[in-house]
Image (tube, rainbow, N blue to C red):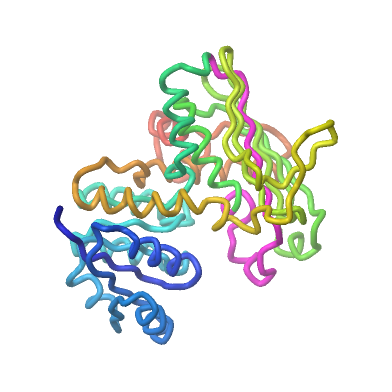
Amino acid sequence: MSLMRIGVAGVGRIGAMHARNLTALETVDELVLFDPQPERAVALARELGAAAVADPDTLLAGVDGVVLATPTDTHPEWVRRTVAAGVPTLCEKPIASDLAELIVLIADVEASGVPVLVGFQRRFDPAVIELKRRLDAGESGTPYLVRAIGQDAAPPDLGYLPASGGIFRDLLIHDLDAVPWLLGEPVVEVFAGGSVLVDRAFADADDVDNAVVVLRFAGGAHAVLTGGRHNPAGYDHRIEVLGSAQSLVVGLDPRTPLTSLEPGGPQARPDAYPGFPERFARAYRNEMRVFVEVVAGRQANPSPVRDSLGSLVLAEACERSRRAGRPVDPASVPADVGIGPAAAVEVAR
């Protein structure tokens, strides 16, 4: 088995986690780190026995693949740099936060032929992958309803809010990607609402801290997505699928922060998940394993850039629906930035 040299650009919390997970892979021979704050790369390189480099060109000159965990507003520039260098890339979501910019970037990436994976970790979670397999195999029968719950244990740093893109682009974007991917059907209607219940700072940032989204799919099934910024019992993320043959759930385990009032029912524990890195630890480990397999040409890209356009379209539709107080056809969103009707339906899948 050939060994690889993998780079990581940006070694803050997420980048450092990815770097540690990469060092655990037998197929990764060497890790190369870069960060705009050089001391962070040097410190982590010392901890992991990796190499630290001082500039992006040096990073890309000698690696087989690169993981991008730099600030969101740098993603488009970095992705263009990596594909120009011919280096397969995994980029944290979003690869671009503006629809018009994302459309152009997708065209550039696809024209390059270089694999670029978008870091939607739900697609790499072993339980979610198994749910996808069972749905594709028809084991659940006809899907009637999907419920997805996403609750942060603690609100994000309030200084982050103005640049977050809002709850639909920041928190619920993961389920706006995962749920249509699981069902394999286009979304034909979006209805969303939200409230400020946690902190007035969300309203000051023109955002909400609790939100509900209803998606209607072409086949008639509905999905109800809920997201919130504060759950003192712990971080909670679940996806439930109720079908004609079987009901399935991921994210329900002994660390799920739920307290049942039924005799013998599950109780919230002190070791409930404190945040998403712990809840999705298996997903993040598998994400790096899959990325290396894609770099090696042994696996297809499970999270291509075009799919990320669909989730951003839905997030924009949610925001428009919340503000207007009415359902929105997601096909109308990309049309506003120059995508024709047929393509608009395709990206909303």
Q: From which residue to which does the magenta span run?
A: 142-170
> Horizontal placement of 227 versus 8: left or right?
right
Could one spot residue 116 in this view of the protein? yes
User: Could one spot residue 108 in this view of the protein?
Assistant: no
Q: Where residue 188 appears, x then y in whole percent?
A: 54, 27
Disc tally is: 0
Which of the 4 image quarters holds residue 215? Answer: top right
Q: In which image quadrant can residue 49 be found?
A: bottom left
Q: Please tell me which residue lies in front, 346 or 26.
A: 26
What residue lies at 71% left-to-right and 50% top-to-bottom? Answer: 228
Residue at 49% x, 42% y is: 311
Q: Residue 245 placed where, x, y %?
A: 56, 13
Q: Nearer the viewer, residue 220 or 34?
A: 34
Q: Residue at x 34, y 44 (%)?
A: 304
**Residue farthest bottom in this picture:** 39
**Magenta stretch contains residue 164:** yes
- Seen at 85% across and 35% down, the residue is 261
Is 293 in the magenta?
no
